[in-house]
Amino acid sequence: GAVVSQHPSRVICKSGTSVKIECRSLDFQATTMFWYRQFPKQSLMLMATSNEGSKATYEQGVEKDKFLINHASLTLSTLTVTSAHPEDSSFYICSARGLGQAPYEQYFGPGTRLTVT
Amino acid sequence: AQTVTQSQPEMSVQEAETVTLSCTYDTSESDYYLFWYKQPPSRQMILVIRQEAYKQQNATENRFSVNFQKAAKSFSLKISDSQLGDAAMYFCAYRSGRHSNYQLIWGAGTKLIIKP
């Protein structure tokens, strides 16, 4: 199956700083990528959908200026958490699908644990 | 809007026995996909099984099978011969069949505990 990687797997940053999380499709071209946030013992919450070369579509309640998503190439999408605060601490997961894949196919990255101190 | 409901926050089963996880959904669409995902302690999401709504036959993957009741909008997962490695969070998810919409709608999840 197709592989999606995320980097870093875990990151600790200080309050007020920005942190970037990368999501890469390793063996396919990802035309669409999804970013999720997951709090402990909860389900996945979709934050935004990004299509390569287009601006991301954010879900209601997600601050666009705080969670910057860039999908500039067919293999890379980045999520930048700007001016991070402790309440941004969470597990962030990306998923991706590519051109030509079956409509039900979507591949998940291993996730990034963000801790803001 | 579509919704997915998992009414069992936690289930436990004795190793080697069978367990069924429940999922119901609400939609006005006729074309859609349903999924069961497993999230072990590593938190990597793993696709367990998939069902296309247009297929009447229930999907099966080795020890995992579903009971898809389209009219009742029910999609339960049966795990046979439970193994310790099956312990995880299980999420039911829905995806519209419309080509322009690939978003997954997620249930709240069921924590499955396997008793040795």
Image: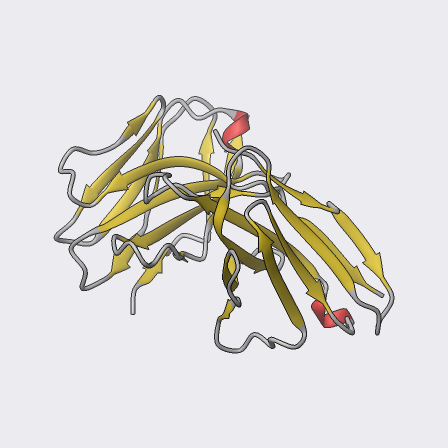
Q: Nearer the viewer, residue B52 or B116?
A: B52
Percent position of residue B102, x then y = 37, 54
Q: At x 32% / y 47%, what residue is drawn?
A: B22
Residue A42 figure quarter = bottom right
Indicate left or right for A79 with B83 as reference: right
Quarter of the figure with the C terminus of chain A: bottom right
Residue A71 figure quarter = bottom right
Indicate left or right for B42 with B64 as reference: right
User: Residue B83, relative to residue A11: is it above or below?
Assistant: above
Residue A85 figure quarter = bottom right
Q: At x 34% / y 43%, what residue is drawn?
A: A104
Percent position of residue B114, x then y = 51, 32
Q: At x 51% / y 60%, what residue is drawn?
A: A50
Indicate left or right for A42 with B109 as reference: right
Percent position of residue A95, x then y = 52, 48
Percent position of residue A27, x then y = 55, 32
